Amino acid sequence: MWIKDSVAQGGYLAVVIMMAIESANIPLPSEAIMPTAGILVQQGKMNFHLAALAGAIGCVIGSIPSYLLGMYGGRPFLAKYGRYLLLKEKELELAEKWVDRWGDMTFFVCRMLPVVRTFISFPAGVLKAHFLMFNIFTFIGSLIWCYFLTWVGVYFGENMETFRSIWHKFDLVIVIICVGGFGYYLYRHLKH
């Protein structure tokens, strides 16, 4: 609810800030931020293209500190503090394999994948990906992702009454699944 209120009150700047937070390894879901902007687009309170652009700009801004932390902190930092960033050595190794196989295009693709997109900047820094190319791919991949999620919000806004009636029937189940899934994800990443 606070995401909706923040986007409604702060507009494009709120979208930039929240998407920057999401891209800085802090799990604030873009899946909640951008559809909220989409609902506001559907209501005529935001512009579709500017909302998606604000989201992509936020992603680039938030990715830079995480990238630099990876670049200058590297593997020793990951070994010591990775669990607080919800990153493990094996995930970095997987990222390395993807980069070896697909090059910088990996960062473009990862920016359109849920969860992975939040954490890809740190491994990019550790792997010393070309900074300019990383930012270009981050922007383009994020822009596509933000357009998609904004469109989802517009669609949801146009069909809100239909969704509301379905949603209310399953409120408790949806909350339990979301909390349980997030709890399991945290447990797997924070356990010793």
Image (spheres, rainbow, N blue to C red):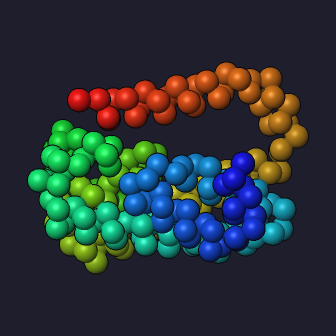
What x and y, as percent, mark residue 70?
22, 61
What x and y, as percent, mark residue 148?
59, 55
Q: Quadrant of residue 187?
A: top left
Number of residue marks = 0
Direction from residue 153 to residue 52 in the image, left or right: left
What x and y, as percent, mark residue 99?
19, 55
Up-down relation of residue 142 to residue 185 (above or below): below
Direction from residue 57 to residue 54 in the image, left or right: right
Q: Residue at x 59, y 61 (%)?
A: 147
In the orientation shown, which residue stands out farthest toward the left?
A: 76
Direction from residue 6 to residue 28 in the image, left or right: left
What x and y, as percent, mark residue 190?
32, 34
**106 or 59, which lies in front?**
59
Q: Quadrant of residue 47?
A: bottom right
Up-down relation of residue 137 to residue 89 (above or below): below
On-image quarter of the C terminus:
top left
Q: Is residue 61 visible?
A: yes
In the orientation shown, which residue stands out farthest toward the bottom?
A: 132
Q: Residue at x 83, y 51 (%)?
A: 158
In the orientation shown, which residue stands out farthest toward the right?
A: 161
Q: Is residue 144 visible?
A: no
Q: Residue at x 23, y 55 (%)?
A: 123
**180 or 128, which lies in front?**
180
